[in-house]
Amino acid sequence: MIMVFRGVMVDVKKMLLAFLTVLTLPFGPAVAAEAAPAVVQSSPSAAAVPYHIVRPGETIKKIAAFYHITPAQLRAWNGIIKPNQPAVDGVLNLAKPQAQLAGWRTWAEGVTPGQVNWDPAAKCPVVPAKLRKVWVTYIDFYGASHLGSVVVNQAIAAQTQRVFRVLYRMRFRIQGMSPMSLNAPYLSDMGTVTAGYSCRKVAGTQTLSQHAYGMAIDINPVQNPMIRGTSIDPVNGSTFLARAAYRRGMVHAAGAVRAFTANGFYWGGRWHSLKDYMHFSPTNK
Ligand SMILES: [Zn+2]
């Protein structure tokens, strides 16, 4: 990720922290207040219900017992039909949500050169006619659903749709997808955006990124930063270096990563030269 507009709303961030009562630490005495988004202009958390992020080995029965609710309640509040067990990295409401979750929708459409900032002089390797804007329903950090888009190569449009369908069924949370002005107007840090196509080079090299081919997707960059030596990108991802933690938006090998790998993507979190936890590509580059 290269676009980072840093905000200065520290006091607002503190204020938001006070509002947040989300539950992210399972099976322990502590109830953690989740870190606030980088920049916040309002408090979309007001309508949010407490939630639980599923870890390996957890079942509906165990989770319900821990929170002193019944398995039937937990299933009802999350639209789970017996006997399905929740997926790791999935998110479960711990109270009745205000509204039923919208049905999942998807479609893919062409892009105009303007939509991808096409500049012939930049000699980007894939012409706009070969790119697709893939629209999907996703769930944000506060449990609200939105229609968001990623631009990818037409060759991977269908598998991209399948990935996001799995993530939606898990109720995996995504901080923001385009159009951010509609979907997350309280975020001004564009380093938070889940996105695909971007005609750019791999940071620090002359090699074109797979994003320049529309062959890579970065998901929740702040929560899944790229680590190369001692450098972290985005820098505000530095509080997410403890990868065994389960905090909203983080991907794990036993969880959200599978939504991608089951659909032909490889994960940058498995690389050895560097770790790019946000990055998925069918080329493994
Ligand atoms: Zn990437």
Image (cartoon, rainbow, N blue to C red):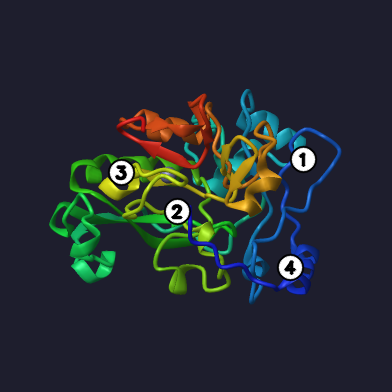
Specify the amino acid type for callout 4: Lys
Q: Residues within 10 Å of mark 3 (few under 14, many from 20)?
A: many
Q: CA distance from mark 3 to mark 4?
A: 33 Å
Q: Nearer the viewer, mark 2 or mark 3?
A: 2
- 28 shown above or below 177: above
Residue kind at label 3, given as amino acid type: Thr
Q: Secondary structure at mark 3?
A: helix
The correct choice, above or below, for 35 with respect to 47 in the image is: above
Q: Are marks 3 and 4 in contact (CB under 8 Å)?
A: no
Judging by the rendered image, the residue that carries numbered circle 2 is 194
Percent x, y of residue 175: 53, 56
The picture quadrant for ligand 1 comes to top left
Q: CA distance from mark 2 to mark 3?
A: 13 Å
* Residue at the disc numbered 1: 68
Disc assigned to residue 13: 4
Q: CA distance from mark 1 to mark 3?
A: 38 Å
Q: CA distance from mark 1 to mark 2?
A: 35 Å
> Quick one: 249 or 47, which is closer to the camera?
249
